[in-house]
Amino acid sequence: MAAPAVLTHMALSPGIRFQRLDALRLSAGFARLPAAFHTRLPPTPLPAPYLVAGSADAAVLLGLDPELIDHPDFPALFAGNCLPAGAEPLAAVYSGHQFGVWAGQLGDGRAHLLGEVESAAGPLEIQLKGAGPTPYSRFADGRAVLRSSIREFLASEAMAALGVPTTRALCVIGSAAPVQRETRETAAVVTRLAPSFVRFGSFEHWHAQDRTAELRTLADHVIDRFRPALREAAQPYAAFLTDVARRTGELIAHWQAVGFMHGVMNTDNMSILGLTLDYGPFGFMEAFDAGHICNHSDHTGRYQYRAQPRVAYWNLYVLGDALSPLIGRPELVKDLVDAAFPPAFEATFMQSMRAKLGLATAREDDAELIDALFGLLQAGRADYPLFFRGLSQLPGTVEPAARGRVDAPVRDLFLDRPRCDAFLVRWRARLAAEGSVDAERQAAMRAVNPRYVLRNWVAEAAIRRAREGDFGGVAEVLTCLRRPFDEHPWLAHYAAPPPDWAAGLSVSCSS
Ligand code: AMP
Ligand code: MG
């Protein structure tokens, strides 16, 4: 890599360790594992790479001066055309269940792990997605298209800003190189960051071959590097399964509360650290429908919104089965998952929904209020983010005669206004019962109910501009999503429900 020019103005925020691109140094992360776990190979260079978008927040997380995103050497570095010092690029092997069926060996078919950086938040592994074929590509090309790369980039940063555990995205690098999908598109590489990209399927891979030594090596790697406290437990591997089940329960509760749909909850897309992983045909709930299927290729609706908790639960049983040789008592595995997942899901979901409703205390009949809420949303197909943001504006009391005006931000989302009014009466009674103070509650509600989520039409609009070489749309959307609770008045159009042109948008697995 050519030596970068000296930068004239540097952001001297604390935690910035790399003020020059050539100062970035990686050490071995997943590469510490023995040869059976991966294949070492360099990324395939991407012709004439250019910057599409970068996340200053992700750069800071990595310890990288965010101004370096605009450095002329940045695109080549994060396209995989040249490597940072210490990089040991590799593709990891894993297996998994896809749509409930054992799929056998999969692996990083288009992702290269480069190595890790010791960040302020602990180790962060850098991965390039779309950087060329690997031995696990099977019949595919190892590339990712600009469209899906922009979607993954924006969604990763949006979820982080919403407080949902997720892998992060540093940047999207584009190229004119053609990639064939349903139509001819162009290639892009997303740089993803996570402490680890190990999946449930990484464990299934070894269990399926009865290779208990490798299974143990992998579990020890994850425990020692990321969950050292579990070593203190009487049975560390049982504690490990419990930990994954608890974190997965919390994760899925966050998804349900923010209205995130993953779209492909195969076990190879489930993070062992409880992070949202592998953004493909995901969606954010707009017109509420608990049966919404965001993945056009999911013909049976296996991964529809309402199914996500139950699918995660099933996936945890699969993981438990894979870990059973280490836990020693196969009959215990189901009990461990049953003891950890439902309460973690329930507690986090209730806590999140109470916060969204502006409730500061917990009451026994809150579950009924929340059921009534989802019944109302479902019947009215109300826009999910607009509903909660609207609710955040409403006062705790209203004269019946003034309802039409005062409650309009919520009420006007429904054709059946009386049903909405009935819910609001119940909600206000609940607020009164805890002595809720309007200004405080409204501020608290605005801090948990986003003005901006990554609506499909918003992503599509940014993608269409990017295809024409105008990356301003991606930058604008990122501005909204990285601070989703702020108003951003000049970008308010991105908070709107889908315009007419977007009515028929669908998202397939193709990426
Ligand atoms: P996904 O459904 O995106 O989670 O991918 C499932 C499997 O297919 C993983 O092993 C991916 O690495 C692999 N895969 C998906 N797309 C490609 C591609 N374009 N080239 C190579 N492998 C791919
Ligand atoms: Mg995947």
Image (cartoon, rainbow, N blue to C red):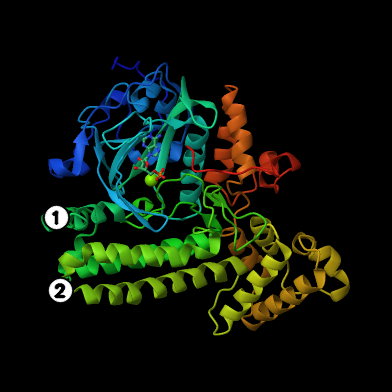
- N-terminal of the pair, mark 2 or mark 1, is 1
Residue at the spot 11% in from the left edge and 56% down from the top edge: 213
Front disc: 2 or 1: 1
Farthest residue, direction left? 213
- Tell me which corner region of the image, top left, top right, bottom left or bottom right, holds residue 340: bottom left
| Image disc number at residue 60 | none
The amino acid beneath tag 2 is: Ala
Count how many numbered circles sit on residues in the image. Answer: 2
Secondary structure category for the residue under label 1: loop
Residue appearing at x 60%, y 35% in the figure: 476
Horizontal and vertical percent for residue 250? Answer: 42, 65
Badge 2 marks a residue whose secondary structure is loop
Left or right: where 393 falls relative to 318: right
The correct choice, above or below, for 281 with respect to 145 in the image is: below
- Three-letter code for the amino acid on which mark 1 is drawn: Arg
Q: Residue 313, position in %: x, y?
A: 39, 67
Q: Which residue is mark 1?
A: 211
Image location (x, y in percent) of residue 168: 40, 44
Pick the quarter of the image with the N terminus: top left
**In the displayed structure, does residue 135 sit left or right of residue 475?**
left
Taking the view exactly as shown, the residue that stands out farthest to the right is: 401
Question: Does the beta carbon at disc 2 come under 8 Å from ligand 2?
Answer: no
Count neighbours of disc 2 (C-alpha within 10 A) and say few if under 14, some if 14 to 19, many if 20 or more: few
Residue 92 rendering spot, x and y as whole percentages: 25, 41
Q: Quadrant of residue 143?
A: top left
* The label number, if any, that marks residue 234 in the structure image: 2
Name the quarter showing ligand 2. Answer: top left
- Left or right: residue 217 compared with residue 67: left
